[in-house]
Amino acid sequence: MVPVDLDLAVIAPLRGAAARRGCSESTASTRGIATPSSAVVAAQRRNGYASEMFDYMLRNLIDQCGLHRVGLVTLASNAPSLALYRKLGFVEEGRERQAIFRDGQYHDLIAMGLLAAEWRKHKSIA
């Protein structure tokens, strides 16, 4: 396994889109664990870019860097992200109640995780 300290920003036209921005910040120690995040500009959401970005990121983190686990958190109210993460094979691992203050109110966060073996099994089925 390769120890990784990775900051990745992707800013590129993709499949003919006028603009796309995706960012991920991952840190992995020799334990083989990463915690990525992503963002796609509002005008380009619901076009498959986040799915493509996470597929690329997971392939590299798990298959190339040899990571054992990828974890993330998202707002409990963020239904599109939750659906995407579940589609990619992530499993809900917990809820942090009122863990973030945004737009004048507290929101819950959902923690999710994906093990390398689950990713490989999911990719072989998909």
Image (cartoon, rainbow, N blue to C red):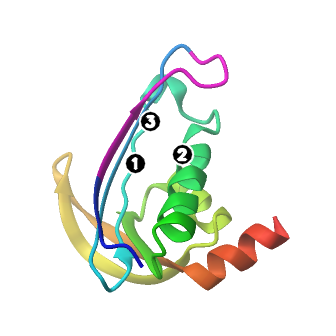
Which corner quadrant of the image does residue 103 belong to?
top left
Q: Earlier in the sequence, mark 1 or mark 2?
A: 1
Q: Which residue is mark 2?
A: 53
Across and down, in percent, residue 42 comes to 44, 29
Cβ–Cβ under 8 Å for marks 3 and 1: yes
Q: Which mark's residue is nearer the viewer, 1 or 2?
A: 2
SS for dot 2: helix
Total residue callouts: 3
Judging depth in this view, the residue of 114 and 110 nearest the camera is 114
At horizontal 43% and vertical 58% (from top left) the residue drawn is 77
* Residue with the mark numbered 3: 40
Proximity of marks 3 and 2: CB atoms separated by less than 8 Å? yes
The residue at 31%/73% (across/down) is 3
Question: Magenta segment, which residues?
Answer: 7-17
Q: Is residue 12 left or right of residue 27?
A: right
Q: In the structure shown, which secondary structural element does the residue marked by tag 1 occupy?
A: loop
Q: Amino acid at mark 1?
A: Ser
Cα separation between marks 1 and 2: 8 Å
Separation of disc 3 and disc 1 at Cα? 7 Å
